[in-house]
Image (tube, rainbow, N blue to C red):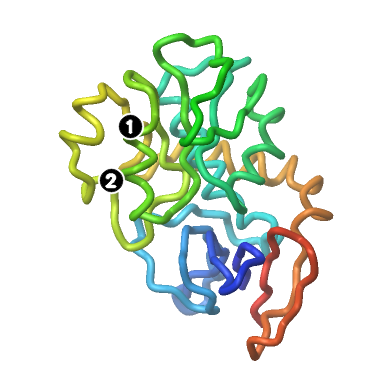
Amino acid sequence: MYTLCGNSTPWRAVTAVGHLEAEHGEPNAYVAYFTDSTSEQDVVDVSELVPLGVDLPSPLMTVVPIVSRLFSALEHGGVDVGWSGYVVGSGVASRVLHALAPFVGARRLVDFDITAPPEEPPDRAGSDLFLVTDPEESRLTSWLSSIPDGSLVALVVPPAGSSPRALNFYDTIHKKSLTLLGHSGAQIPAQQRAVRLGEMRLDGLASDIPVYDAPGDDGFEPGDHPALILQWS
């Protein structure tokens, strides 16, 4: 149905909304999920699906998996309203996090440059929250090695085709005393909160993330927007 992509060459797919074929006589159920494929069909493990219900969802519900992972991280990290944190990476997911930060209890989010540690850390000394939004596994190990020891780390966008278990856990996590948040299994309460937020608050993103009919060739020019949603007919 819909695929949230970064406006780059080639396009980078981040999430999608689709439907599950129902039994005879039953309505289709709609779901959202992470993907790295720009197509109208994906093969996804059922544990990675976020249920959206039987009503036709808004294209902007493609951001629900991102918000669901954020809520899961905040819950597992015991992060209170008024929290501050860092965004590691750039692109679609980072833009979504910055846009929705005021609606998820954040006081501020700061982009973290791994080549230059920030001058002014958040208030939670010793347990800073880092939200990693780039799915490139080749860069993930480098970023984790640059994050200060003792930090809370959430992989908001999972590495494509792998999981945190593929990392050298001892070298990248244990030796630095990092806490990896909300990275395994379906988190039903977090998913439900993300869907409710999506239903109430996503209209403000409509002008920033436009919807286009999915192209049939590589000549499609969506304009200057850093992100777009492809609509599959």
Residue that numbered label 2 is attached to:
164
Sequence-wise, which precedes: disc 1 or disc 2? 2
Image spot of residue 117 (x, y percent)? 49, 26
Q: Residues within 10 Å of mark 2 (few under 14, many from 20)?
A: some
Is 146 in front, or is 124? 146
Image spot of residue 18 (x, y percent)? 55, 68
Q: Residue placed farthest to the left in the image?
A: 170
Q: Residue at x 50, y 45 (%)?
A: 133
Q: Quadrant of the C terminus?
A: bottom right
Residue type at mark 2? Answer: Pro
Q: Quadrant of the N terminus?
A: bottom right
Which secondary structure lies at badge 1? strand
Is residue 189 toward the left or the right of residue 52 in the image?
left
Q: CA distance from mark 1 to mark 2?
A: 9 Å
Does residue 80 sit above or below 155 in this rendering? above
Residue type at mark 1? Answer: Leu
Q: Residue at x 35, y 54 (%)?
A: 137
Give the number of callouts. 2
Badge 1 vs badge 2, beta-carbon distance below 8 Å: yes
Location of residue 146 by image quarter: top left
Does residue 228 sit above or below 120 in this rendering? below
Q: Residue placed farthest to the front in the image?
A: 115
Image spot of residue 107 (x, y percent)? 67, 19
Is residue 101 toward the left or the right of residue 39 in the image?
right
Does residue 65 sit above or below 213 in this rendering? above
Location of residue 73 by image quarter: top left
Image spot of residue 157 (x, y percent)? 46, 49
Q: Residue placed farthest to the right in the image?
A: 207
Which secondary structure lies at badge 2? helix
Q: Residue at x 61, y 64 (%)?
A: 5
Residue that numbered label 1 is attached to:
180
Q: Residue at x 33, y 32 (%)?
A: 180
